[in-house]
Image (cartoon, grey):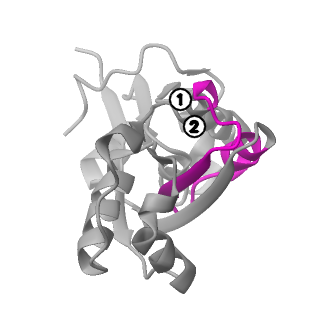
Amino acid sequence: MQKVLEIRVKTKRIPLSRASIQALRDIDRYDLVVFTSRHARKFFTQALRQYAAQPPLPGRVVQVGPRADLLKLPLDSKRVLFPRSAAAPYDIVRKMRRRGAVVRVVRLYTPYRTTLSPAQKRSLLAGAVEKICFRSPSGINGLLDQVPHSQRKTIFAVRTFCIGETTARAARAAGFQQVSVKGYNTSHAIP
């Protein structure tokens, strides 16, 4: 059996700015509400309930993944509400605006790392892990925070699979040598 280490992150809701609360209350002013993660959708629903805001009309809600699929939408002159992580890269927002969208970002949550178990860390550092799967750049940073610089050479050589191109770019920038977005599968993850 192939030994796979899936790196996950946990999330926690953050306080909303006044402008974000107002955007939720004025949701009918937006042509689209776009989600690029299940976490964004979950925290968005909680915030709507907390601030007594009405949910958006079903035809105005778009769920995409990977987030680059946002650029496939007809965005010209659209008012877009974009609930997301506070740690998410901003490049997609700039690209949407260049395509003519008026984008209002609502930062709802922040990721934090999940600590590796002692067994996972031993397997990783002993070279017993054949594949690492990342779901986000935050997962890459969280893993590297747990591994001393002197021991990173071992993990940088492990085949690395990422959920999307943004995460893959972050993995390459961190030093991982064999990075792919194809073959992302965690069915044999190390417990």
User: What amino acid is at disc 1?
Assistant: Gly
Residues rendered magenta in the picture: 71-97
Q: Is residue 2 above or below residue 24?
A: above
Residue 158: x and y in percent read 52, 26
Nearer-the-camera pick, 15 or 129: 15
Residue visible at 29% across and 59% down in the picture: 55
Q: Is residue 26 above or below residue 32?
A: below
Q: Report if the CB atoms under discs 2 and 1 are less than 8 Å apart.
A: yes
Residue visible at 44% across and 33% down in the picture: 64
Nearer-the-camera pick, 153 or 17: 17
Q: How many marks?
A: 2
Q: Which residue is mark 1?
A: 164
Does the magenta portion include 59?
Answer: no
User: What amino acid is at disc 2?
Assistant: Thr
Q: Is residue 125 above or below residue 47?
A: above
Residue 126 visible:
no
Residue 187, disc? none
Q: Which residue is mark 2?
A: 167
Indicate the quadrant containing the N terminus: top left, top right, bottom left or bottom right: top left
Question: Is 115 positioned to the left or the right of 26 in the image?
Answer: left
Nearer-the-camera pick, 31 or 110: 31
